[in-house]
Image: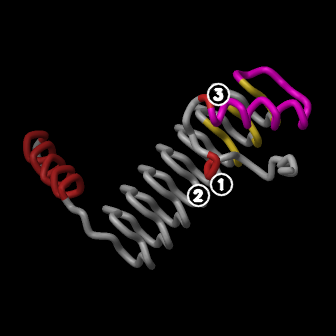
Amino acid sequence: MTRAEFEAELRKLLQGHETGTANERCVECVACERCVDCTFCRGSKALQRCHYCVDSQRCADSTHCRGCRDLLKCSHCVASERCTQSSYLVRSVDCTGCTYCFGCVGLVRKDFHILNQPYDRSTYFALTSKLMRELGLGAGAEPGPAPRAAHR
């Protein structure tokens, strides 16, 4: 096989992959494309073994994520990218092994951080609750089991 033959065949494979829209072995996925072994996802593309993800792309082995890209083994993340083995991240990028991080970049094994700065648990939830509203990320996307004040 020559270099030209290889390049031509690779271009064909890439084009076929990019233009295909069929899901494989998915259950109750709606408006998804190129997803494999997923359940109950919506409006997502190229997910693998994900569950309950919405408006996400190229994630694998993740669950309950929304508006995310390129996650691996994450759960309950919102608008985050390229994170691995993390949970309850919001607007975070390139974090690994983190939980409850908001607007963080490049952290490894950190918890309760906002913009890469540590906070105690109660302060974290108070600040992120306000930030979620300010940034228009919606109450339904609020990360984690934040305590709610009783309404009178």
Pointer 1 local density, CA inside 10 Å: few below 14, some 14–19, many at least 20: many
Nearer to us in this view, 52 or 74: 52
Mark 1 residue element = loop
The residue identified by callout 2 is 62
Where is residue 64? Give x, y as percent.
60, 59
Where 82 falls versus 148 (above or below)?
above
Where is residue 113? Give x, y as percent.
78, 29
Q: CA distance from mark 1 to mark 3?
A: 16 Å
**Residue at 83%, 50% in the rendered image:** 151
How many marks the image carries: the answer is: 3
Mark earlier in primary sequence (2, 3): 2
Mark earlier in primary sequence (1, 3): 1
Q: Main secondary structure of the magenta part?
A: helix
Residue type, numbered disc 1: Ser
The boundaries of the magenta stretch are: 115-133
In front: mark 1 or mark 3? 3
Q: Which mark is residue 75?
A: 1
Where 15 falls versus 112 (above or below)?
below
Q: Answer yes or no: do the residues labelled 2 and 1 have beta carbons within 8 Å?
A: yes
**Residue at 53%, 50% in the rendered image:** 66
**Residue at 90%, 36% in the rendered image:** 122
Where is residue 55? Give x, y as percent.
43, 52
The residue identified by callout 3 is 103
Mark 3 residue element = loop
Mark 2 residue element = loop
Quarter-wise, where is residue 46 in the image? bottom left
**Residue at 84%, 24% in the rendered image:** 118
Q: CA distance from mark 2 to mark 3?
A: 19 Å
Residue type, numbered disc 3: Gly
